[in-house]
Image (cartoon, rainbow, N blue to C red):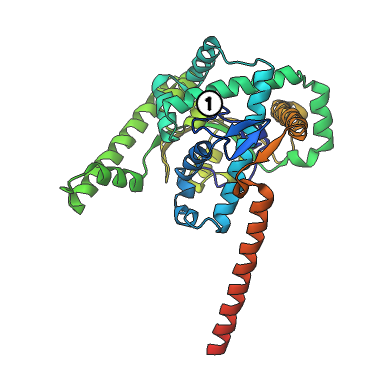
Amino acid sequence: MTNNKGVNMKSLKVALVALATSVALVGCSGGEGIITVNDKPIYKSDYKKIEKQIMTQPQFAFMADQLKDPNSVFSLIMKDKISNELVIKEIIAQEMDKREIKATDEDVKKYEAELTEKIGGKDKLAQFLKENGVSRKQFESDMMEEIKIGKLVESVEKINITTEDCKKYYNANKKQFNYPDRVRASHILIEANTDKIRQDIINQDKFGKLDAAAIEAKVKEKMDAQKKLAEDVRAKAVQNQADFAKLAKQYSTDTMSAVRGGDLGFFAKEHMVPEFSEAAFALKINTVSAVVKTSYGYHIIIVTDRARAGIQPFEKVKDEIEAYLIQAKKVEIMQKLFEGLKANAKVVYNDKQYDPSVINAQMQKTLSEQAKAQKENLKKEEAKK
């Protein structure tokens, strides 16, 4: 729904994810492995597992053909990324073992219960996992690793961000808080995208029995049903605005905001698609909008606050700053820990094709060959003229 023209501090990409995610390696191949970290092997099956996870992501699917050429720039970047990730994971995993850090069944149950409550129930959680292509097994593994990472950070250093810390950051970075007119709004999205619905219908029609007219009729039927659902949900929200957050958790297909009761935080007009922004900025505070149609579907919006253009008061942004500083501190702790561990780790690339120095040398060679080929092609084109 956003136009991605602005970056909020809350969108900080926590390096913890890059440093250690799913640290339990496969390690089932036997032998010395393609890489060893402190004499513990990392196998090619470990590499292939991560490669498969990356390549099944939609944004990388179109690059599959380039992986067939081991010396293509994409293949080399991918190899360097995965090899580095495997080493990071193993170093962090060994440190966790050393500190006897574990995620107990009770830890996992508590974590899942809290997440399930925030997201609006088991059905919403299942929907969220499905939309993001995460299996139940992977979800459980991710929970365990997030719990362990949290414990690892706590074992290294206790994080204590004070009001004074927040004020110091605010005073040193006031330009970051010089905002245009903004509103804070919550919404409930009833997904209704004609292209997606059409494709779903075509995919379900395995024997090709539906002609174009029949498909379009089904698309209209689904769109009408989604609109009717949006109108029914809006009626409930109008009847009792106190239930808006509860309704968002129950009905909204925007799972990222649904866990917060539909809250989108503060945003400027240009940060949302036009139809959404126009409706939100025209609303009075604590008034439920009519059903708003965008390319994402049908929205029910409620504006909960407004902020005039200018530098926002400290009290308005304190929570935002605190969340940012906590995350930044976690990143700092993990980076320092990893740098120290890596400096003392014995990393051996038994298969040289996974060695960063070898990968970099091949990358330079490939780029040089591409530049040379491009130059020759330009000469040929000039000669034709």
Residue at (75%, 40%) from the top-left corner? 176
What is the residue that sits farthest to the top in this orientation? 106
| Left or right: residue 359 compared with residue 202 | right
Residue 190 in which image quadrant:
top left
- Residue 30 in the image: state x and y as whole percent: 51, 32
Residue at (56%, 40%) from the top-left corner? 281
What is the residue that sits farthest to the left in this orientation? 209
Q: Is residue 228 visible?
A: yes
- Residue 8 in the image: state x and y as whole percent: 65, 38
Residue at (65%, 15%) from the top-left corner? 100
| Left or right: residue 266 compared with residue 219 | right
Residue at (71%, 31%) from the top-left corner? 331
* Residue 28 in the image: above or below residue 174: above
The amino acid type, in three-letter code, at marker 1 is: Asp
| Left or right: residue 254 compared with residue 14 | left
Residue position for label 1 = 142
Name the foreground residue: 362 vs 12: 362
Report crowding for label 1: few under 14, some 14 to 19, many 20 or more residues within 10 A (C-alpha). Answer: some
- Residue 204 in the image: state x and y as whole percent: 24, 41
* Residue 129 in the image: above or below residue 115: below
Name the foreground residue: 65 vs 220: 65
